[in-house]
Image: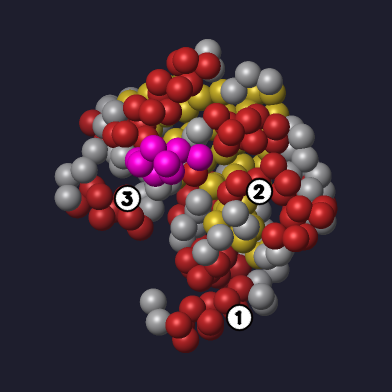
Amino acid sequence: MGSKNKMKRFKENETFPNVVQPTREEMVEGFEWNGKWSQFFGNDNPITLELGCGKGEYTVALARKYPNRNFIGIDIKGARFWRGAKTAVEEKLDNAAFLRTQIELVDLAFAKAEISEIWITFPDPQIKYKRTKHRMTNPEFLDRYRTILKPDGLIHLKTDSEYMHGYTLGLLEGLGEEILYAHHNIYTNTEAPEEVIGTQTFYEKQYLETGKAITYMKFKLRQ
């Protein structure tokens, strides 16, 4: 993507009512919407996050499917989620929003037990050991999610990385967390949840075209 195109998208994001772009300092010093997302949406409906949302395919698709729930796509790359934000505005999906920030600050963006559900869609598996701290299902990240999730909150992990799937599965079992569903090749499972196979991200479609297996799991964290 050219720099001019990126700048155009950055500028357009600033005009969208469904995009929030705090600075890191604002997040650390006290984010204005922490604990107040019901005011942002104008209702008390359950909130679902899509972490590392990319183009926001899941945020938009789920917002269409569940009008009585609210959805927030989070990514640091505003030029990428511009597509999802623009689509949500064009379709008048008032239950879809986008937050530009680092995922490691997620517990500063939301209050304790403010979130009902989290989707982690095709994260970088960070395979090298020295990158473990950046892996989005490592223990530190799980503790952040634990803080903002309601007691019965759900987490979904969908990835093309067998390593990420196996790492997370082993970690959850070791920690004694509740694994509700896990499959190493979701599109070969005739009983796969519709919301898992019914929505495909931009990169997921590319993976499927090459015959790559897509893994999925759903789990809960002890409070």
Q: Secondary structure at mark 3?
A: helix
Pointer 3 or 1: first along the chain = 1
Picture quadrant of residue 94: bottom right
* Cα distance between the residues tagged 3 and 1: 28 Å
Using a 10 Å C-alpha cutoff, classify the residue at mark 1 as few (fewer than 14 neighbours), some (14 to 19) or many (20 or more).
Answer: some
Q: Secondary structure at mark 1?
A: helix
Is residue 136 in sight in this rendering?
Answer: no
Which numbered marker is on residue 11?
1
Residue depicted at 77% across the width and 40% down the height: 111
Whether residue 146 sits left or right of residue 177 in the image: it is right
Q: Amino acid at mark 3?
A: Glu
Q: Secondary structure at mark 2?
A: helix
Q: Amino acid at mark 1?
A: Lys
Answer above or below: position of 114 versus 61: above
Q: How is the image coloured?
A: secondary structure
* Cα distance between the residues tagged 2 and 1: 24 Å
Quarter in which the N terminus is drawn: bottom left
Which numbered marker is on residue 204?
3
